[in-house]
Image (cartoon, rainbow, N blue to C red):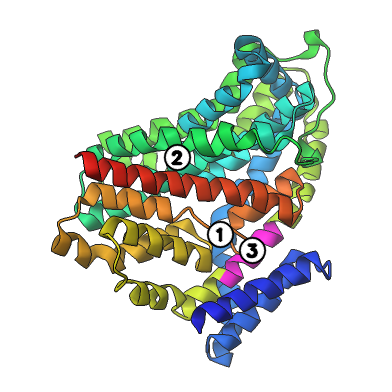
Amino acid sequence: MTLICIALCIVVLVLLISVFKIHPFPSFLVASVLAAVLLGLPVEQIASSLEKGIGDMLSSLVILIAFGAMFGKIIAVSGAAQRIATTMMNIVGAKNIQWAMMVVGFIVGIPLFYGVGFVLMVPLIFSVTYKYKLPAVFIGLPMLAALSVTHGYLPPHPSPSALVVQFGANMGLTLLYGFCLAIPAIIVAGPFLAQFLKKIHSEPLKTFIAEDLPEEQLPGVLNSFFTALLPVILLIFTTVMQWLTPEGTYLHKLFLFFGSPSIVLMLVFFYALFSLGILQGNRIETIMTSCTIAVKDVAAIILIIAGSGALKQIFTDTGVSEDIASSLQSLPIPPLALGWFIAAIIRACVGSATVAGLTTGSMILPLIASTGTDPNLMVLAVGAGSLAFSHVNDSGFWMFKEYFNLSIRDTVLSWSAMEFLVALVGLVGVLLLNALI
């Protein structure tokens, strides 16, 4: 009955958006209220659940999206993106640009949370597609597949890190196995899948479009690459220093502060104003006007993501994930496949890979000891499953749709298919590793 209620709410959401052309934000709220009623949430709690879901979602993303949009706009209008795109194309060539984007996404994705990596890398994707007239989905999917895999498979991301501790796994061994699985998963769900998606029409968000500048007006190669990669450099540096400094010391707390993605993006925004603005002879007023336009362009995305947070909170408050996991525990399938399957079902229902992974961890933990399952492989099985079945209740689905300006159908064919392939290859890889070790 629970699954029927969830399916009905999702159908209503899709119909409101695609058939009746209602904006996704009010559509999400209608679907959320319907879900609350059907799943038995007390009437007096519905409003507070909606508000909490919206608040929790925006508290973690609004700074990233807003500063990411402004930072990306500066990279675009200053000519830095043009310089980066030209340099990359000269080094790897048009035939290999997908692979270059995939490698960049994997390197960036290891230290960065998915949302941070997405908003930082999208301007680079669009710069390449605009300058060289290449299909945006074809170029962007390999990089985003790499970001997704690192988010679901590898520590230090929240879900795999927590599962390593919860299952008593070995962090180093989990990382080693994770790299073995991540590479084929990214290749299959990235460059391979993208070959079939060249005809998907996409007109990416116009805020990252900038007219080509003459060569003499472009910032230098070092300045362009350093400024664009500075968020990654700072996050890697502060993360390493947090490991090296004793907990509780002032220095450790200082690195915790400067290692916050919100603080990092705020700092690099002001650095970009200096390095790509003042140093290049651009007026601050002109750049800030462009940044204001960029924020306006992503305001709709922020609302849509907020709406998805409301629906996710309703599913959380009604205990949907726990009910589903409990009912699936008795299925007669191998423990690793069961961990993957439970995480995949919860992901489909609640939309969050992190919630799916952590919820599955608490459900599957007793089976690890009783069946003698390798805890390192179980971390990866649950992590892979938590990426499956991304659809309209996932904020990542809407970020991809709105940034790339796709229809729901094309988003499912590209984004949802990519996430499912990532999860499926992860499951096959885990079962193969289990047979070999």
| Mark 3 neighbour density, 10 Å: few (under 14) some (14–19) many (20 or more) | many
Question: Which residue appears farthest toward the top when viewing the image?
Answer: 216
Q: Quadrant of the C terminus?
A: top left
Q: Which residue is mark 3?
A: 306
Q: Earlier in the sequence, mark 2 or mark 1?
A: 1
Q: Which mark is residue 59?
A: 1
Label 2 SS: helix
Magenta-colored stretch includes residue 304: yes
Q: Is residue 261 above or below residue 2?
A: above
Q: Earlier in the sequence, mark 1 or mark 3?
A: 1
Residue for point 59% across, 88% down: 37
Stretch in magenta = 302-311
**Pointers 2 and 1 in contact (C-beta within 8 Å):** no
Q: CA distance from mark 3 to mark 2?
A: 26 Å
Residue 59, position as x, y percentages in the image: 56, 59
Residue for point 68% across, 17% down: 94
**Pointers 1 and 3 in contact (C-beta within 8 Å):** no
Residue 75, position as x, y percentages in the image: 70, 28
Magenta-colored stretch includes residue 135: no
- Type of residue at label 2? Phe
Q: Nearer the viewer, mark 3 or mark 2?
A: 3
Q: Which residue is mark 2?
A: 258
